[in-house]
Image (spheres, helix red, strand yellow):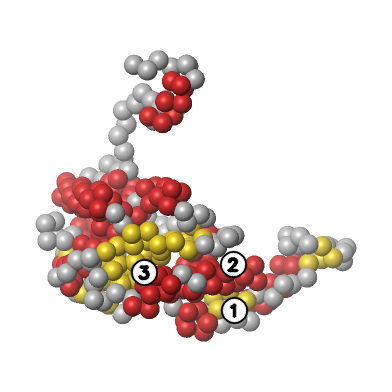
Amino acid sequence: MIEIEKLKKLIDPSLITPGWREIPTDEYHADKTAVNFSSLKHIEKSSHAFARSYWGKPKKRTAAMRFGSIAHLAILEGHKFKQMVVVMPDFQSRTAAGVITDSKNTNYYRMQVLEWELAQDPKAIVVTTEDMDRILNMIESVMSNEAAVNLIKRGKPEVIGYWTDKQTGINLRLAGDLLAFDVEVLTDLKTCQDSRWELFRKNVESHRYDLQMAMYREGIYHITGIKPQHGAWLAVESQEPYETRIHEVGPKYETIGDFEFRRSIDKLKKSIDEKTFAHGKEEIMVGEPTVWFERKYIQLGVLNNE
């Protein structure tokens, strides 16, 4: 059930203090007084999807999501990573008959892991030897990229900020990966499988990184009075060959992101005012191929170029 009265609190500016905050990441993610990007992006699908994301049960973190968070910490806050990380030993596994096996799906293996985990500090970040090897390769890749090193050195990681949108009165929040406090560069670290632009941009458009950048630029402007001069995605591959590339946010993405941010905020305000968080459109659509898919079959003579 969507609790509309609680969502109305998103337009109560007395619930937040605008500006930068030094708070734990867990506290930031649990906050329900202001909207973050992770929830706002769902309103493109429907206002109901936003409400479910914002007020529903938190999604279970996947192994990939957890690894991405750990990689962020290792690359941007190496001192914290070194203090908190614990590498799990390579435990031996045996079958019920006592035969040594490579399978980790045995009671013998699971009991060893459980006993070891119970002996660790609850706040420790536990990683496998395989994941630690991947993280070290990613760090080495970033450190070998001079431009990436300069971005990291001049910026402050995990910057948390709160503000109220002047046009709608909606409370908003951000957790920027890396911000240079001369407000010249806003950098967002993204782990990926392939950092080449022609492949990475698929992530930009499918995950709406453009909207995220626009929202963060807007927040920084409200808090500091200055918009970042540049935005950049620091793309680091999480698998072989572990390459790092920097992609500056182009003016077209900035324009599209600004448009989508304003449209999303306005849609959210309308839903709150009307107390209606409706599902997506229910009309039946006639399915048509994309231009690129259609062109392939025009060239093959299957379709007419009409």
The answer for how far apart the CA atoms under marks 3 and 1 are is 23 Å
Q: Position of residue 20 (x, y in %)?
A: 25, 76
Classify residue 129 as left or right of residue 288.
right
Q: Circle 3: is it few (<14), some (14-19), or many (20+) Cα within 10 Å? A: many
For image coordinates 20% across by 62% down, the residue present is 218
Q: Circle 1: is it few (<14), some (14-19), or many (20+) Cα within 10 Å? A: some
**Label 2, on which residue?**
134
Q: Do the residues labelled 3 and 2 touch (CB within 8 Å)?
A: no
Q: Tell me if residue 2 comes above or below residue 36 in the rendering.
A: above
Looking at numbered disc 2 in the image, what kind of residue is underneath it?
Arg
Q: What element carries label 2?
A: helix
Q: Tell me if residue 282 comes above or below residue 136 in the rendering.
A: above
Q: Quadrant of the C terminus?
A: top left
Looking at numbered disc 3 in the image, what kind of residue is underneath it?
Asp
**Label 3, on which residue?**
177
Q: What element carries label 3?
A: strand
Q: Position of residue 106 (x, y in %)?
A: 76, 62
Front one among 23 and 282: 23
**Label 1, on which residue?**
86
Q: Which of marks 3 and 1 is nearer the N terminus?
A: 1
